[in-house]
Image (cartoon, rainbow, N blue to C red):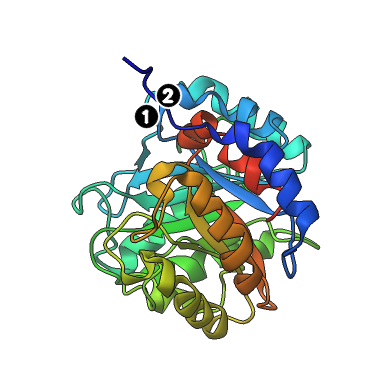
Amino acid sequence: MAPERRPCPLTLLLPLVALALLAGAAAAKPTGQLTVFWGRNANEGTLREACDTGLYTTVVISFYSVFGHGRYWGDLSGHPLSTVGADIKHCQSKNILVLLSIGGNATSSDYSLPSSASAAAVADNLWNAHLGGRRKGVYRPFGDAAVDGIDFYIDRGSPDHYDELARRLDGYNRFYRGRKGVRLTASPRCGFPDARLEKALRTGLFERIHVRFYGGGDKCSRTWDVAEAWEKWTAAYPRAQIYLGLAAAESGVPEGAKGTIAVYLKYLYYDVLPKVQKANNYGGVMVWDRFADKKTGYSGVVKGWA
């Protein structure tokens, strides 16, 4: 019996990638900016390890997933909280931006903003528990480490009051001189507009938008719709940097694509990136997530194209 044929890991595709880079079809405007989500699987390694790969320019801790009803908590899927604060500082010392993402794939009862008062309370907790605030009695899960900003990854519940939350968070920048201490980003679904984040994004306070071209359920997950959706996002938010959000695994092959992940990488390199990088506000690539990326070596391949 012939031996079973196994998929070729992405790391073995590096020679092919090098040849492709030399052969032509260079990206229109690469930035070298690569963002990864970390915190969804204890087997992905530590935050420090992710930053020490040299692959990422931003790491997004996920998720702060319980808020809006007088309870505030995050779920890091088994990662010990005791080490995260030191790791945040380590990453920042390497000029890697560290963000905290709120929301995620929890049930709708775990987070929402039922009122303006709840938006104010959540902003207050984020400021004092994870950002630059230091109010006595507020628990800081990461100790005295402060993240660089907040990412909105709202996949459940009502869209109400997230615009108010964004304004309140941005308001804390009055405590900083010469820099932004609270940076705001968002990670909407690729279908434009994202109903849950549209009102918040219209505030103009989000400097980056990571558009998620993965996860299924959206028309723009298909190969032939990516460019059309991308044009809508970049045109709607010209002052924000727009990132192409991709899944770091075979599951990232768009619906309708044929063949192996190698075919998808060729499609990404020769077709998608040259199109999206023409936008003046193209920011880079966002990868979901560190656990899958560590297994596949995806970012090691894509880094040079971002």
Residue under the point 60% across and 49% down:
35
2 or 1: tag closer to the N-terminus: 2
**Disc number at residue 42?**
2
* Dot 1 amino acid type: Ser
Check disc 2 and give the amino acid type.
Answer: Ala
Q: Residues within 10 Å of mark 1 (few under 14, many from 20)?
A: few
In percent of width and height, residue 202 lies at: 47, 81
Name the residue at 56% across, 53% down.
286
Q: Kindly tell me whether residue 30 is visible in this rendering.
A: yes
Image coords of residue 301 (percent x, y)? 64, 43
Q: Tag 2, which secondary structure?
A: helix
Q: Describe residue 93's horizontal placement relative to residue 65 as left or right.
A: right
Res. 56 visible in picture: no
Residues marked 2 and 1 touching at CB (< 8 Å): yes
Rendered position, 254 above or below 141: below
Badge 2: how crowded within 10 Å, few (<14), some, or many (20+)?
A: some
Q: Nearer the viewer, residue 197 or 36?
A: 36
Classify residue 71 as left or right of residue 252. left
Give residue 90's quadrant in the image.
Answer: top right
Query: Which residue is rendered at x = 35% and y = 39% of the image?
Result: 73
Give 103 or 70, whichever is nearer the viewer: 103
